[in-house]
Image (cartoon, grey):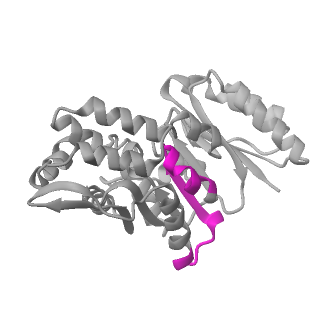
Amino acid sequence: MHHVITIVAAPEAVPALPDTARSFRSTIESVQPIEWLADHACDIFFEPKNQDTLKDIREAVHNTLADVPADAFIQPVAKRRKRMLVADMDSTIIGQESLDEIADAVGIGPQITAITERAMRGEMDFETALKERIELLKGFPEAKLQSILDERITLNPGAETLLATMLKNNARAVLVSGGFTLFTQAIAERLGFDAHYGNRFIMEDGAITGVAEPILGQDAKLATLRQEAADNGIDLTEVIAVGDGANDLSMLKAAGVGVAYHAKPIVACEAAARINHGDLTTLLYFQGYRQDEFVTPNK
């Protein structure tokens, strides 16, 4: 089966990328020329003799790039360009943890952030962590949530291009978050996601009093991915999923390609692909898109 190594270099590694790519090509005895997707991204196609050879190549790539600011991924060429994107929101599509931003606004940021970090590292279950954080946020005015969204929430680099490019190429895009629908709806509308899923605040007298059941956590994210794929006639091998926290692991493992994005160690270790240096457009390079195929808001 034909495979491809995609290498995406951080700016400081770009000058060395041609030599690195040629070295890989020689090591794996590739007979095809290097295909440049951009000045900082390339594909190297090859056909491993067997699974042991493929394992050795994966180890070689990992070891060679261990101290190099570049992301690399090896995968079969077949079904490389995906028909559906399933993305986490907090610290993946957006640069913040939305509940942490609410907490910071009321002066209890460190307390909430500590719980968030434990949950994202897998040190406590997500449902318990969410309930504990909402308990601390009881009484926060509903009217102020919009200002949190407007003033504190920003998109991660490459998010707009990732969505615009995949949507232009007829992929379905789904936002699934352990955060709240007030935020997922706004981000989904801004970027053009086809569907969004999140948790719901319980409000009384214009203030947060709790979180509605059932809570959307790790199992629900997995179920959403599977249901969205089934409803749209998309095989799981044709899904690319991206996230950063422990509650994303199940959906990352179920997708054809699961990508850990600047993720917690437990996620980075277990996901099929990792982005440690690049922005979200790295997901496009992993799918074989060239930079001149990218769709950006000003085009």
Q: Nearer the viewer, residue 210 or 89?
A: 210
In screen coordinates, is 257 left or right of 33? left
Q: Is residue 221 visible?
A: yes
Residue 202 placement (x, y as % from top left)? 23, 61
Q: Nearer the viewer, residue 243 or 206?
A: 206
Q: How many marks?
A: 0
Q: Is residue 288 visible?
A: no
Instruction: Residue at 25% x, 33% y: name it.
Output: 109
Instruction: Residue at 30% x, 63% y: name it.
Output: 212
Residue 294 placement (x, y as % from top left)? 45, 53
Q: Quadrant of residue 52?
A: top right
In screen coordinates, is 86 left or right of 32? left
Q: Nearer the viewer, residue 177 or 27?
A: 177
Residues in magenta?
230-253
Instruction: Residue at 51% x, 50% y: name it.
Output: 248
Taking the magenta stretch, the answer to whether it contains residue 244 is: yes
Q: Nearer the viewer, residue 58 or 22?
A: 58
Quadrant holding the N terminus: bottom right
Residue 60 placement (x, y as % from top left)? 77, 30
Quadrant holding the C terminus: bottom left
Instruction: Residue at 85% x, 38% y: name it.
Output: 29
Residue 106 placement (x, y as % from top left)? 15, 37
